Image (cartoon, rainbow, N blue to C red):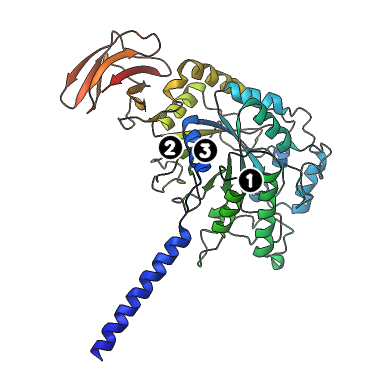
Amino acid sequence: MKQLRILAKIFLFVAVLFATRTYAQEQHYTPSPENIKARQQFEESRFGIFIHWGIYSMFAQGEWYLQNMPIDKFEYAKAADAFYPHRFDAKKWVETIKASGAKYICFTSRHHDSFSMWDTNESDFNIVDATPFGRDVIKELADECHKQGIKLHLYYSHIDWMRDEYPLGRTGTKVIGRNRDNENWPAYYKFMNNQLTELLTNYGEIGAIWFDGKWDRDEDTIPFDWQLKEQYELIHNLQPACLIGNNHHETPTPGEDIQIFERDIPGENTAGLSGQEIGHLPLETCQTMNGMWGYKLVDQNYKSTERLIRYLVSTAGKGANLLLNVGPQPNGEIPAAAVERLKEMGEWLQQNGETVYGTKAGDIPAQEWGVTTRKDNRLFVHIFDCNDKELFLPLDCKVKKAFVYSNKKPLKFKKEKGCIRLLFNEAPSGTDYIVELITK
């Protein structure tokens, strides 16, 4: 009997080991050479613009208006009949964003309210069929991005507050007019994949698919199977270089190519949405320019250009990209306050872009005075707040030269054990006082 028990334990161990290895193989994802190259280009870009725009802009209450108010879905849908953004100009949008120094655009193709911003065959609730505007916004935007050399990424919602087929999670429950007896995940999953196929087939090269909404089922007793593996494979089969990110507030899963942090620089969690560990994938932080993602009439609390530049630099100092959001108005224009800040950020990047683009996280973690970024043997010290004429830098590497980045004037420094001490004629000031160190 003892031998039988031992054999049984051995058999169980082997079975578990085999099952674990099989699961690991099933979960394994090997990115294509095109994908690896796209990841590198993504990391080098460091700055992108997020655009939240849909019929929710008509209500001027932000992109969650349908969820936040008890609204009848059929009444909400009527807004499409009045959606005529006559001032939308894809050429002007892309020119404005390119001048800001951003290298890519991430546009909301379909948000949680189900409205599609392209000529989809999967639903009549789209900007071509349901509005008097009748133009394919994504087509115009894609064409202009390709023409001007800006990458186009597409946001796509995993949830839908309007379609009965989507099995509601913890959001969308206030929406009036939904028939929960018609919930049908297989049908909804097919709908999503058909739409993704359209986006990745009819609009040229797409830099990334940016998923959102998995958090809708994070309170389920039994974990919900989103069937991400198959969906990710579909995307990579259609466009191998297309990156996949998922704003699920979790560590990345196999098939994903970038790791997203919402409203926080990686390693921080001030908004309560970014408690996950930092993985090995390229990193991106999405942040709003004011308070909301979608257009909200009363939200004029725009962050200053100085604050936005410092946030961009701080994000780069963590080795991450900044995806900075703007919410266009219902008439199709980007708000003037956003345009002004984009212009000023572009002017700053014209002068200082090489200390951000193509850099890695610096040798020194973020400090009260600022951050650092590195490019080969060049270490850029970004000083935001320093009231003294000297600054101690904890550095192990050897410093050969130090100078002020803006005018290349040599800067005195002293080597001390485990650090160097920068010596200034007067305390550094300005949005970002940059010192360049040549290291060995």
Indicate whether 307 appears above or below 318: above
Q: Quadrant of residue 293?
A: top right
| Residue bearing the label numbered 3 | 38
Q: Residue furthest bottom?
A: 1
Report the quarter where the C terminus lies: top left
Q: x, y (%) of residue 432?
A: 41, 19
Indicate whether 327 appears above or below 161: above
Q: Nearer the viewer, residue 401 or 343?
A: 401
| Residue bearing the label numbered 1 | 64
Residue 113 visible in the displayed image: no
Residue 290 marker: none
Report the quarter where the N terminus lies: bottom left
Crowd class of label 2 (few under 14; some 14 to 19; many from 20; radius 10 Å): many
| Residue bearing the label numbered 2 | 265
Kind of residue sitting beneath label 3: Ala
Mark 3–mark 2 Cα distance, whole angstroms, equals 22 Å
Q: x, y (%) of residue 4?
A: 28, 88
Q: Residue, x 55% and y 54% (percent of image)?
A: 214
Circle 1 SS class: loop
Mark 3–mark 1 Cα distance, whole angstroms, equals 32 Å
Q: Residue, x 73% and y 38% (percent of image)?
A: 58
Q: Residue furthest front?
A: 33
Kind of residue sitting beneath label 1: Trp
